[in-house]
Amino acid sequence: MAANSEFNHAADVKGMIQKNKQSKSIQGKLEKVIPILLFLFAIISILTTVGIVVTLLAETIEFFKRVPIWDFFTGTVLKPLSQNPQFGVLPLINGTIISSIIAMLVAGPIGIMAAIYLSEYASDRVRRVLKPLLELLAGIPTIVYGFFAFTFVTPLIRSIWPGVEATNILSPGIVMGIMIIPMIASLSEDAMTSVPNSIREGALGLGATKLETTFKVVIPAALSGIIASFVLGISRAIGETMIVTIASGSSKNFTFDITESMQTMTAYIVEVSGGEAAAGSTIYYSLYAVAMTLFVFTLLMNLLARFVSRKFREEY
Amino acid sequence: MSLATVKENVSMAKNQSNAVISTSTVNGIVFDTKDLNLWYGETHALKEINLTIHEKEVTAIIGPSGCGKSTYLKTLNRMVELVPSVRTTGVITYKGKSILDKAFKVEDLRTHVGMVFQKPNPFPKSIYDNIAYGPRIHGIRNKKILDEIVEKSLRGAYIWDEVKDRLKENAYGLSGGQQQRLCIARTLAIEPDVILMDEPTSALDPKSTLKIEDLVQELKRNYSIIIVTHNMQQAARISDRTAFFLDGEVIEFNDTDTIFTNPYDKRTEDYISGRFG
């Protein structure tokens, strides 16, 4: 055998390939089957989303059979557990929007300043240390942030501004903002860092100062990425649950007073699904209606993010 | 307001921040470099450079890759300082004022000494905004004056006819050669005295290259131009004086005709006859 293979080497290789080709019929099948499997894995998340939407939609329709859609979207009173329950969603939408605005007022300016510093001013060494540290903030579980809001930030605010209630929307709004800072800083920094250096040199070569270069060339060039980071931040704020559940209480007030307790859509879902919502009751179905509203909100935000990042793109 | 007052406006804006730069030259010399040494970290990139750049002439700097010619050019508007580890000794005077002093404001220097880069680098903005950027950062906001500046600069760079109907379009829609002329127009918009060109045609096709070369000939009536080039024929065609750099030293600096017909240094002769480089 050994001698044979030494002398008829070429013939052996040919024979082996020939032999292997016959067994290739199995491989041929694999070549066809595996892409189909891969495709199935790829559409799992899409199917899941579709499944969620279908479930939401079905239960939401059931809810609107009991509570008129008009009353739901224009009602300012939410009393799901009262003898004479009312299901106006506006207090929840209001709470969601106000907490998101507070969060963005904190996260927007701080995030973008941090991004400008990291991208334009920090030395490589500083950036290599700071950026991962900043991104570490994003890894803190939101329940920890919620606890931080309730046990640290709220007392702090109350010591300065005694009129603030023990549960209020201001404190979780601020903490949500802190939570979103790394996201905005990191994504905006990516957008600004990817602006080619040659463009900065062009501006500096015209006698522009570093600030003029940053604000009139780099930021406009990175604007699509910066805006996209903002919109993603907003959508994160809208979907945030634990922080507001813990620190903002469950008052269903329809108010614009940030010192008071408010409930967001997400916190309502937590409260009701943790409570005594018997399957089939109106309050049970209201969960789905609120979840659907929330879903539409975040969907719109994500579509907006796509739209603005295309619209404001400065090609380079 | 007329265009004559535009120049006044620009120089007024310049003078407000720093009054040291005069408008007249000393004996027709724009830049005078004395014993310039430059290091990138430990690398000695420029060694004892002595050069004088004359007003309203084209000075070409030639030499093989890595000889320090781009570094020298970028020292003239202190763009070289963007590399953090740079260190210099020696003196460069621009119209009699020493520019390497840390106290000398680089922004003022760069408003007088414009630069065109190796690769066209327009801003990702409209053609109009590209030109108007320089005047705007120097405080010119009047729309009518800006319109005038934009037209004059684009005409000055011989690109007006090609872009006049699409001023609002993104500059990145232009061809490479057009982009480079746009960058030259952008430099002209703040009416500098000197234009530094760092291999401005190395990324362009022959036809665009020819256009830029013609443009340089036109520009030298009003501007002093220093051009770094890899292309010796280009230096011979367009420059009045040529400096030959090798390993961070100036080997020979003379009238272009003399350099190309009768160089006194053997290394210059070897380089221009294509024996190395």
Image: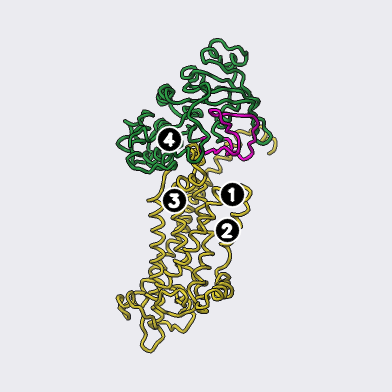
Chain colours: A yellow, B green
- Is mark 4 in CB contact (under 8 Å) with mark 1? no
Q: Amino acid at mark 2?
A: Glu
* Residue A140 in the image: above or below residue B210: below
- Residue B87 lies in the magenta stretch: yes
Query: Are marks 2 and 4 in one subunit?
Result: no
Q: Which residue is rendered at x = 61% and y = 23% of the image? A: B50
Of callouts 3 and 1, the N-terminal one: 1
Residue with the mark numbered 2: A135
Badge 2 element: helix
Image: magenta residue range: B80-109
* Residue A181 in the image: above or below residue B49: below
Q: Between tags 3 and 2, which lies in front?
A: 3
Q: Position of residue B62 (x, y in %)?
A: 55, 22
- The reply, left or right, for residue B214 in relation to residue A110 is left
Residue with the mark numbered 1: A122
Packing grade of label 2 (10 A; few <14, some 14-19, many >=20) is some
Q: CA distance from mark 4 to mark 1?
A: 30 Å
Q: CA distance from mark 3 to mark 1?
A: 20 Å
Mark 3, chain letter? A
- The reply, left or right, for residue B237 in relation to residue B47 is left
Mark 1, chain letter? A
Q: Amino acid at mark 4?
A: Ile
Badge 3 element: helix
